[in-house]
Image (cartoon, rainbow, N blue to C red):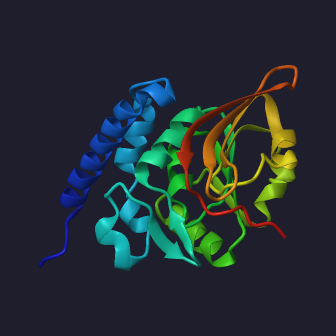
Amino acid sequence: MKPMTEEHLAVLRRHMVEMIAIYTDLASEELGKAALDERVMAAMRRVPRHLFVPASVAPYAYQDRPLPIGFDKTVSQPFIVALMTDLLAPQPHEAVLEIGTGLGYQTAILAELAGQVWSVEIIEEFASHAEALLQGLGFSNVGIRVGDGSRGWPDHAPFDKILVSVAAERAPPALLEQLKPGGRLVLPVGPEVAQLLTVIDKDSAGQLKTRKLIPVRFSRLETV
């Protein structure tokens, strides 16, 4: 069989986004909305997910499923990437902190929508691979460092928005501290068998309001 062309891949990306729209509609009661922001959907249509996974699983890149990326880690299924991005609602003037770069797929989606993305990854091989890939694709608004994500990135704090793509028993205190008043944190919270996608808003007085949405399954936040 001959290799797929860019045209083939673009069609598969469109189909992936159509599936995301269907899943969103089906989950509308739990989510409180029947559709995701069109800016998010457009970013999902643009970013080439097949480049952000190992070549062995690239043929499955546009199926709505998590895929292994090495070190017993996965890249989240496209629906969850789109949903978390929509919940975060990154804007062109905002600085976003991401915890858990992986190979950089979620990072690229955020970089399409935010002014600046700072991303922390604990696995050095992931961080260097993602940095090279994102630079090669022309993303100039991303900074990546190797480190313990639970500590955030104090040098660039405070952040307008924070997205955590690994699960924690509770929101790490350092991340709540590094979130601007009026900011938002999106992360999976809970033990391995009972994680819930969670949105935490910090008001202008620094008070926190928490919403728990749908069950999810993420790798655990690693700390050092």
Tell me the quadrant of the picture where the N terminus can be found: bottom left
> Looking at the picture, how far across and down is residue 113, in whole percent?
53, 39
Quarter of the image where one finds residue 165: bottom right
> Looking at the picture, how far across and down is residue 200, in whole percent?
72, 33
Tell me the quadrant of the picture where the C terminus can be found: bottom right
Q: In the visual, does 157 lie left or right of 21?
A: right
The residue at 65%/57% (across/down) is 166
The residue at 59%/39% (across/down) is 114
Which residue extends farthest left?
1
Residue nearer the viewer, 139 or 195? 195
The residue at 13%/77% (across/down) is 2
Q: In the visual, does 95 lie left or right of 39?
A: right
Residue nearer the viewer, 123 or 29? 29
Total residue callouts: 0
> Looking at the picture, how far across and down is residue 143, in whole percent?
68, 57
Vertical position of residue 2 compared to residue 140: above or below: below
> Looking at the picture, how far across and down is residue 155, in whole percent?
86, 52
Residue nearer the viewer, 161 or 207? 207
Quarter of the image where one finds residue 121: bottom right
Could you tell me if residue 150 is visible in this image? yes
The residue at 86%/51% (across/down) is 154
Vertical position of residue 41 compared to residue 217: above or below: above
Q: In the visual, does 194 lie left or right of 41?
A: right
Vertical position of residue 175 compared to residue 2: above or below: above
Q: In the visual, does 204 lie left or right of 134?
A: right
Could you tell me if residue 139 is visible in this image? no
Which residue extends farthest top?
204
